[in-house]
Image: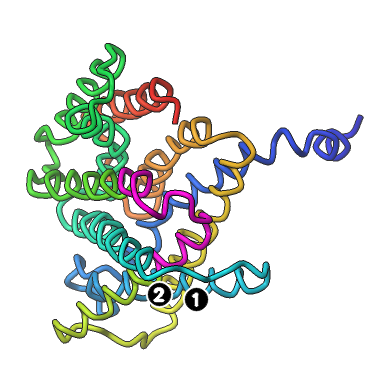
Amino acid sequence: MSLKTYFSQHRGEWKGPLMAITAAVFYGFIPAFTLPIHGSDSGNAEAMSNPSILFYRFFGAAVMLGFYMLLKRRSFRITRGEAVTLIYLAFLSDGAALFLLAGYSYMPTGIATTIHFTYPVVTTVIMMMFYNEARRPATIVATCMAVAGVAGLSWPSENGAVELRGVVIELISALCFALYLIRVNRSRVRSMDSLRLTFYVLLFGGLIFGGDALRQDSLEMVSTPRQMINLLLLAFVCTVVTNLCLVTAVKRIGSTTAAVLGALEPLTAVVLGSLLFSEVITLNIVIGIILIIPSVIIVILTRGR
């Protein structure tokens, strides 16, 4: 049996995991497309402000996803109450994205992405503290592992690459995304079609960043091919493709398995940071990753969602 025949016969089995892996890996490319135009590089003449980058990313992704929904003849209809909830969710999603980018100024992008990846653990802690979710021993152990992992990433090293301020910023990013996930599952939009929900969160998020950039008089026009290419890749690859792949993966293999495969996200960011931006992978980083990624997987498997 040829390899082509095997994959053709087992397409239904491998498509789900492949989509989940693609979503996780492509999401890990965010630093690769962001850092070349990020304002943290003071010597970069093509640098843009964070609100400008996020405006082009989210609004551009919303336009692309909107065209996709038109082709698939998906409904755009929402109620006034749903619109209010979606705007609220957009603020939480924006907070996660904004603080993730802000952390790049204080630490290597791989470390920033890994700390942000603790959001499932943060979600579980919030659920246990405020929503009376059961306190399972495995969850408590995983939480301790995640805390130890973040401490390991934050520990001073010879190259002094990580600042405590950056760690706090990335933890706020994880908190914002955790609150976003909780509110999605506990609001009137819980049963909304996932593509429609994502479209409006991206659209409202882009408008919020655009308004904030105009308020600060910092909305920069795209003026170079490098900026255009990075922003298009950021919107298409890291936002539209990742969301579509994730939706497909969840439908085929379930949210738990898709979430476990999401562990490739910080690993991708660490590898790309080392290869593209010469970010040093120290023993502290290795220990932190070894503690954080298994802790997240334990939480996901324990909660089963």
Residue appearing at x 27%, y 25% in the figure: 133
Residue appearing at x 66%, y 70% in the figure: 73
Q: Which of 184 and 2 is in front in this view?
A: 184
Label drawn at residue 260: none
Residue 163 falls left or right of residue 68 = left
Q: Residue 219's image quarter?
A: bottom left
Helix, strand or loop at mark 1: helix
Label drawn at residue 63: 1
Residue appearing at x 18%, y 43% in the figure: 171
Q: What stretch is highlighted in magenta?
A: 182-202
Q: Residue 285's image quarter?
A: top left
Q: Which of 76 and 301 is in front in this view?
A: 76
Amino acid on which the number 2 mark rests in the picture: Phe
Q: Residue 177, percent across and down?
A: 29, 48
Q: Residue 17, percent across and down?
A: 61, 36
Q: Residue 183, percent across and down?
A: 31, 48
* Residue ID for mark 2: 59
Give the crowd class for mark 1: few <14, some 14-19, many >=20 residues within 10 Å. some
Answer above or below: position of 270 versus 143. Answer: below
Residue 60 falls left or right of residue 52 = right
The answer to whether the residue labelled 1 contacts the one labelled 2, judged by CB atoms less than 8 Å apart, is yes
Amino acid on which the number 1 mark rests in the picture: Val
Q: Residue 10, percent across and down?
A: 79, 33
Residue 37 falls left or right of residue 4 = left
Q: Can residue 283 be seen in this view?
A: no
Distance, label 1 to label 2, CA atoms, is 6 Å
Answer above or below: position of 129 versus 57. Answer: above
Residue 154 falls left or right of residue 261 = left
Q: Residue 99's image quarter?
A: bottom left
